[in-house]
Image: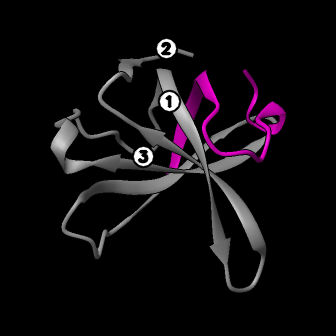
Amino acid sequence: MDISEIKKEPGIWLTVSATVVQLWESKSDVIDQIGLLGDESGVVKFVSFKKNDFPHLEVGKSYLLCDVVTDVYDDPVRGKMLSIKLNKNTDVAEWLT
């Protein structure tokens, strides 16, 4: 699924292939990685939690992410924004483009 096709609704399960565009340092004790995933159609914020013990995603590498779930959060400037969460059901595989 292209990133631009993801509906801005929480709780939708999907599979995405995308490249890690940017990573941020997490200020949370429960978040392992946070950053942006992108494809030719756009970008979306992603969050990976420490309890799931996923391999770290790397900037510039592409991944196939199966069974991620959407979430919506409030950004003080841009309003309701979409994110995807890697969860205990998510499968992560490097995707050769």
Q: Quadrant of the N terminus?
A: top right
Which residue is found at the position 44% from the left and 33% from the top? 61
Q: Quadrant of residue 19?
A: top right
Q: Position of residue 5 (x, y in %)?
A: 83, 32
The type of residue carrying mark 3 is: Val
93 lies above or below 32: above
Q: Can you tell which of label 3 and label 1 is closer to the viewer? A: 1
Which residue is found at the position 17% from the left and 44% from the top? 51
Numbered label attached to residue 96? 2
The alpha-carbon separation of the residues under discs 3 and 1 comes to: 19 Å
27 lies above or below 14: below
Q: Nearer the viewer, residue 7 or 24?
A: 7
Where is mark 1, residue-wise? 68
The type of residue carrying mark 1 is: Val
Dot 1, crowdedness within 10 Å: few (<14), some or many (≥20)?
A: many
Give the SS element for disc 1.
Answer: strand
Q: Earlier in the sequence, mark 3 or mark 1?
A: 3
Where is mark 3, residue-wise? 59
Which residue is found at the position 64% from the left and 31% from the top? 12
* Range shown magenta: 1-22
Q: Position of residue 14 (x, y in %)?
A: 61, 22
- Asked whether residue 64 is in view, the answer is no
Q: Nearer the viewer, residue 11 or 62?
A: 11
Q: Earlier in the sequence, mark 1 or mark 2?
A: 1
Which residue is found at the position 60% from the left and 38% from the top? 11
